[in-house]
Image (cartoon, helix red, strand yellow):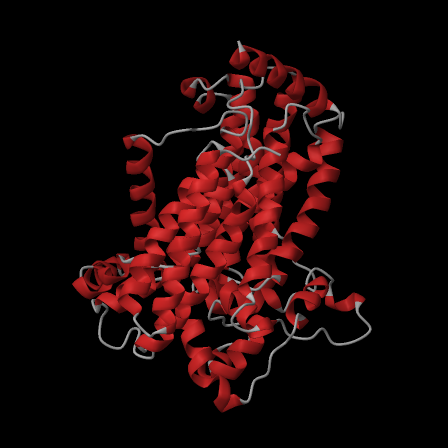
Amino acid sequence: MKVTPNSLMLFAMLLVAVAGACVAATAMLPLPALLLAVVAYALAFLLIKHSVKGYNTLAVLFLVFFFLYNYTAPITVVQGVEPEGYFGEATLPVTAEFIYQVSLALLAFSLPFVVIANRHGGHSPLPAGRYTRRMLILAILLAAGASAGEVVNLLRAGGTSVLLQGKAVYQEATSDLFITIPSAFMAHLAFACLGFGLVGYYDGKLWRMVLNKKFLAFVVSILPVMLIYVVLGRRGPLLGWALSFIIGFTFLRYKRSVGLPVISLALVGYFLLAFLFVARAQIAIAIKTGDTERMMRELSRPERYEKLNPAYNEFGAAFLNFTRFRLREKEVGEQRLYGESYLGAVLVPVPRFLLPFEKPPTITYRFRDMFYESEAKRSRIAGTGFSSVLEAYWNFGFLGVLPVYFLVGCLLFWAERRRASLKGYSILFVGAYLIFVPLMQSFHRSAFGLPFGIVLVTLVLYNVAGVLFVGDRSFYKRVVGRYRGSAGEENAG
């Protein structure tokens, strides 16, 4: 294990900043606490970037969404710029408590990265060969499976009439089906395999990618499920698919800097997804009635675009849920769970018909039924989002985030260290790494059981498909390891 003076210095500064934020939060001084928490975040970002050496990594991606879900809402509340009533329950003392929790979580997550995870630098892209061509075939098959599965789900749920009634109605209808195909995560894998196959076979030449028959076949295969998700306004999966492709495409080469084109593309992508959040109900109505004028009239109202602020859309859910819980915790008489929700996660991927008993509701729905009664009455599966910070607090109290986020940090540190290793790795690791990409977002707004179940099921499906269609499991160990080894010798020279 290698620890550098820079990493020790950054962690020491991080520790001081977190301690200051916690002291200010305990004294119910939200503004100083927030300022110190932002400084702590900047130091944690520098520390983790120093450890992993690249922006296109799970650890950095986790930190980006950590900020969006845990900082944007408190910043908005403390500055007092939110619309009246949007964060109406968010008192400054509860906001200070949330900042306290987030600061401890950041410290615990950053601790493993004091050790350098990537000691080898960048790598050369994978050369052309039959294996990378098979990765493209696997991407097409997964895309076709995702589209076919979602279309089948749609037809079984009632067809386009159910689809046009909106996300909540559609999800409730599909949740009642006996078995549904996990099309969203099949699409995640499809985009990841597409990126990995394209960079290996075409060596980054864009025109050769978009004009290739396999790429066009992928576009045709993935289009049905994409259209369904756009109509539903499901921004999360769409964002996850884009990130899966980017990480897959850059998997063998670390990006040490982020240029203006990348920043511009990220901003354009964010505004498009925010617009989809604002417009999804109007899009469905326009498709159903053909009245596009009403849609344009509704979308021209200025107040709709207040939700371009991340705190006003789904990124504010974690803070709102923590606030609601803290203010009503004593009222409902809720007790600590002491790990119950984490142990119950093992039942999430098990189909209901295989259990001899009724599957207990997840902590997400338990929270909704206790603290958002109106949502529970509106729809059986209507959700309010959740918060990994809240789950840790609900289980273990104010210090609960320390073990939870430390373990998450250890897991991602291991993943980054394994990815950077010159020894190569199996197809299972490649699949596991790429599957975790969308979970870097959903972890912050869901309970532990959701990512655990999805990863377990999808890993099994991916590994079976990979062995069948990509071939030899030792491929990555022989080919990628050899080329990474040569790249390492060049860097050393």
Establish if 160 lies above or below 12: below
Q: Is residue 273 left or right of residue 151?
A: left
Q: Position of residue 231 (x, y in %)?
A: 41, 55
Query: What residue sits 45% from the left and 83% below the top?
Result: 374
What count of labels does the image hold? 0
Q: Quadrant of residue 47?
A: top left
Q: Quadrant of the N terminus?
A: top right
Q: Is residue 36 left or right of residue 44?
A: left
Establish if 307 lies above or below 431: below
Q: Position of residue 145 (x, y in %)?
A: 62, 43
Query: What residue sits 59% from the left and 29% below the top?
Result: 420
Establish if 482 lies above or below 183: above
Q: Position of residue 37 (x, y in %)?
A: 36, 58
Viewer-side residue, 165 vs 1? 1
Q: Is residue 44 left or right of residue 472?
A: left
User: Is residue 165 among what the camera can see?
Assistant: no
Viewer-side residue, 97 vs 192? 97
Query: What residue sits 70% from the left and 27% below the top?
Result: 470
Query: What residue sits 55% from the left and 57% below the top?
Result: 405
Viewer-side residue, 210 vs 7? 7
User: Is residue 439 among what the camera can see?
Assistant: yes
Q: Position of residue 228 (x, y in %)?
A: 47, 52
Q: Quadrant of residue 320?
A: bottom left
